[in-house]
Every structure is written in C-alpha cells, then in structure tokens.
C-alpha cells in the first residue's frame, strides 16, 4: 500500500504508460490518483492478460476488462468442444457479453480471433479463470526451488547478465538482480541501464523512449527454459506491473 501512495505522490508525467493504458488522463485529476483502480479504463481499450501462462486479448467493455471467449476456447480450452465449453459456462452462471461489430473488428486486429469470425462473447477475467479452472484444474504457481534465481540478460548499451532473485523482489524498486560481472544488486529498472563492455558484447543504442520498460528488455538468458520456468518468469514480470509504470526512472 505504501508503494501505491508513494507512486501517486511521485507521479509527474504519464508517458511511461504501456500501450493500451489510458495516457490521456490529466496527472492531477482525482481519477488518475486512484490508479491502479481498473475503473478508469477507457472504453474499447485493448490489453492483454496472461491466463495459465497464455496471453489473451482483453477489451474494456462497460468499464471492465473482458477477455475473448473465442480465443480462450481456441487456446487454453482447445481440447474441449464448443458444446462442452458452452454448457460449462452456463452451469457456472457466467454471462457472455456479445461484442459490437466495432469491438469485433478491434479483436480481429489484435489477433484474438480469425477474420472469418462473425461474433464473439466476452467474459471477465475472473470468470475466465473460473471457467478454465473448471476444465484445467487449479493453476498453482509453479514451485521454484528455494534460492531460485532466473538467469537474465539485456542488450541495452553493451548489455549485461545477472541473476533475478524472485524472493528479493518484494517491491517494484527492490534490488533483486545481482549482476554477474560486478556482483552488485540492482532493481529491474536500473539494471537495464547497467552494462558491461565484454570482449564479445556489441553496442546497441538504447531505445530511449521506451527504456523504462524493463519487462521488454530483460530476457531469460536460456532460450530453452522449461515451461514451468517460463510461466514463473511471466508471473514475476506481472507482479507490480501497475505500480511500476508510475515511477519515472532517471538515468
Ligand atoms: Zn555489473
């Protein structure tokens, strides 16, 4: 909670918001200060939410983020028939909101569904979780060994490599990454500004406008990680997501 208050106080500009978030609100408005309350989402705003490790397109309908049932059916629940999914949804008392033609077009463009789809029902994230849970069972976060660390790298400037220690990541600014070269600890946002010139590193001009988004720059070093590790990494990246976007990082 202190993080939140802090975030609201520190807020001076909005340009570090990720795509899909409302960037038009005035920083001084009351509504803005209540962020991350999802109520100030813009109608038809497209987003993405990770369900059981799969990114699903979301759309803001009546002030609420809703997920595309067709996409959930075609991905997470692809082993079940249309009727099975329909019957289960009804049994769980989950009501679908049908999208308007405009919303349908937005969803198609976002890649949530094929061009040929004529209609799509939208359900809330909570409902989507209930529906998927009824088919797939509880999604308990993967158990990572104690003292587990993700081996991460970034390629900003000369690049660097480090160990992201999830147990140390207890706030958006926690120094949870230990640099593999100098053994110093950094927060994720600071770590992407930290690089070492090694014999085989090549310089990549940092993409200044988006340099704040460590989630995009910081990657698992090992490309062939087990699914469990990949899911855990997604979960870790989603933690503090709405808080972190409020901080301005000065280089
Ligand atoms: Zn270092």
Image (cartoon, rainbow, N blue to C red):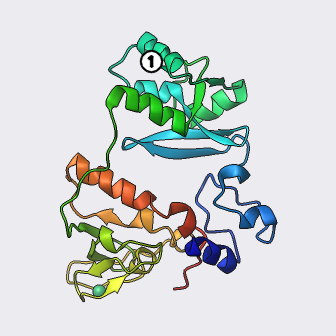
Q: Is residue 98 above or below residue 229?
A: above
Q: Position of residue 67 (x, y in %)?
A: 55, 35
> Looking at the rendering, in which quadrant would you find the N terminus?
bottom right
Q: Is residue 35 above or below residue 193?
A: above
Q: Which residue is mark 1?
A: 85
Q: Position of residue 29 (x, y in %)?
A: 81, 67
Ligand 1 sits in which quadrant? bottom left
In the shown orientation, is residue 160 left or right of residue 170? left
Secondary structure type for disc 1: helix
Q: Position of residue 125 (x, y in %)?
A: 53, 39
Q: Position of residue 206 (x, y in %)?
A: 46, 75
Residue lying at the far top of the rendered structure: 83
Q: Is residue 202 visible?
A: no
Kindly identify the residue that appears in the image at 31 percent across and 54 percent down: 232
Kindly identify the residue that appears in the image at 73 percent across and 42 percent down: 43
In the shown orientation, is residue 172 left or right of residue 102? left
Kindly identify the residue that appears in the image at 32 percent across and 77 percent down: 177
Kindly identify the residue that appears in the image at 54 percent across and 74 percent down: 208
In the shown orientation, is residue 155 left or right of residue 221? right
């Amino acid at each position: 909670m202190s993080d939140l208050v802090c975030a609201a106080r520190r807020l001076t500009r909005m340009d570090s918001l990720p795509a899909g978030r409302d960037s038009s609100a005035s920083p001084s408005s009351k509504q803005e200060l209540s962020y991350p309350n999802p109520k100030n989402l813009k109608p038809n705003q497209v987003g993405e939410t990770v369900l059981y490790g799969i990114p699903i397109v979301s759309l803001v309908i009546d002030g609420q983020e809703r997920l595309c049932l067709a996409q959930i059916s075609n991905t997470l629940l692809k082993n079940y028939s249309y009727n099975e999914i329909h019957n289960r949804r009804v049994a769980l008392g989950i009501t679908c909101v049908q999208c308007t033609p405009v919303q349908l077009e937005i969803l198609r463009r976002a890649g949530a569904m094929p061009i040929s789809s004529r209609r799509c029902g939208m359900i809330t994230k909570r409902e989507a979780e209930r529906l998927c849970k009824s088919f797939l069972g509880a999604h308990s976060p993967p158990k990572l060994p104690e003292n587990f660390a993700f081996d991460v790298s970034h390629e900003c400037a000369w690049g660097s490599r480090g160990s992201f220690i999830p147990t140390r990541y207890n706030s958006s600014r926690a120094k949870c990454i230990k640099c593999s070269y100098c053994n110093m600890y950094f927060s994720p946002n600071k770590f992407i500004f930290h690089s070492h010139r090694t014999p085989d590193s090549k310089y990549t001009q940092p993409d200044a406008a988006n340099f704040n988004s460590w989630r995009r720059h910081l990657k698992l070093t090992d490309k062939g990680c087990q699914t469990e590790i990949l899911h855990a990494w997604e979960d870790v990246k989603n933690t503090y997501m709405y808080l972190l976007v409020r901080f301005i990082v000065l280089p």
